[in-house]
Image (tube, rainbow, N blue to C red):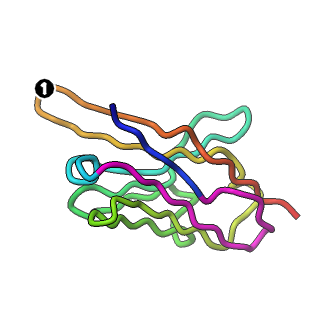
Amino acid sequence: QVQLVESGGGLVQPGGSLKLSCSSSRSVFRNYDLGWYRQAPGKQRELVATIDTDGSRRFGETAKGRFTISRDNAKSTMVLEMTNLKPEDTGVYYCNAMWRRVSDTYEYWGQGTQVTVSS
């Protein structure tokens, strides 16, 4: 069973910064593409950013230019660094791990961590 453990959420003022971390096992970091998604109240879950096993990155439109994503396979940790945060960034942020194989796709989610951007 894959476990994804998120940390780093909290309350931050508009314009502030926050760093989210996601940790898991070494096998997950060796085989899975990783990412962050968020869900605001009353809205669907949306892409924030992903980073594949080869290091390639993809960002949601609202994250471009403000957020960075990185992974340290040796430490089995993925980090989302968020800057210039806006109230609309408020939501529950979920760590995601996905492994697309020829015949199957394996996907797991963390429990989520709350990010609130408010003055």
Q: Residue at x 72, y 32 (%)?
A: 42
The image quadrant of residue 72 is bottom left
| Residue 68 image point, x, y percent | 47, 69
Q: Position of residue 80 (x, y in %)?
A: 50, 63
Any magenta on residue 23?
yes
Q: SS at mark 1?
A: loop
Circle 1 is placed at which residue position? Answer: 103
Q: Which residue shows up at 74% across the image and 73% down it? A: 15
In the rendered structure, which segment of residues is drawn in magenta? 8-25
- Is 28 located above or below residue 66 in the figure? above
Give me the residue at 23% from left, 56% from top.
Answer: 53
Q: Would you say 24 lies left or right of 43 here?
A: left
The N terminus, quarter of image: top left
Q: Mark 1 is on which residue type?
A: Ser
- The residue carrying pointer 1 sits among few (fewer than 14), some (14 to 19) or many (20 or more) residues within 10 Å by Cα, namely few
Seen in the picture, residue 68 relative to 39 is either above or below; the reply is below
Left or right relative to 53: residue 3: right
Q: Nearer the viewer, residue 35 or 28?
A: 28
Pick the front one: 61 or 76: 76
Residue sitting at the far right? 119
Vertical relation: 69 (above or below) 39: below
